[in-house]
Amino acid sequence: MKCFFCGSLESKVLDSRDTDMQKSIRRRRECLNCGKRFTTYETVEVVPILIIKRDHSRQPFDNNKLKKSILIACEKRPVSLEAIDKVCEEIEKEIYNSTSQEIESSTLGELVLRKLRYLDEIAFVRYAIVFKKFDNINQLVNYLSHC
Ligand SMILES: [Zn+2]
């Protein structure tokens, strides 16, 4: 990190602390050349994850959209907002931890189904109906008997 005053690359960190919900780190530095102090900010660069839609178009992963779809599935069910947030967080973590920067919308859907299965069975069925696009009850029953 270049000194703001003399341009020297040698500095020591006096103090560092998280800011903005840990999204950036503020460091107080002292230049070893001129002794002046300055502050730097380090932020984590988040690489956007792209969702590959059924028609092969891509769009950036949107965690608000994800939460909304789960909220709809959980409507009027005894599921707390906290539990929904936790599921969203877990899904996000899995997506961002994967080595690929692109994920098929079908893979994302299966991931959501896996989580909903344990969260609330009715929410799971509702989500499956929308996501799997069943044509009739038989398809739904068939799916449920195999999952
Ligand atoms: Zn300096």
Image (cartoon, grey):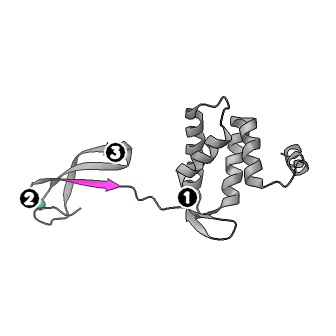
Please tell me in which quarter of the rendered image ligand 1 is found.
bottom left
Residue where numbered disc 1 is placed? 61
Q: Position of residue 91 (x, y in %)?
A: 60, 48
Q: Residue at x 55, y 58 (%)?
A: 61
The secondary structure making up most of the magenta span is strand
Question: Image height check: is 47 above or below 76?
Answer: below
Q: Amino acid at mark 1?
A: Phe
Binning the other alpha carbons within 10 Å of mark 3 as few (below 14), some (14 to 19) or many (20 upward) gives few
Q: Which residues are magenta?
A: 38-45
SS for dot 2: loop
| Quadrant location, the C terminus | top right
* Mark 1 C-beta to ligand 1 under 8 Å: no
Q: Earlier in the sequence, mark 3 or mark 1?
A: 3
- Which one is in front, 43 or 131? 131
| Left or right, 77 with reference to 94 | right
Binning the other alpha carbons within 10 Å of mark 1 as few (below 14), some (14 to 19) or many (20 upward) gives some
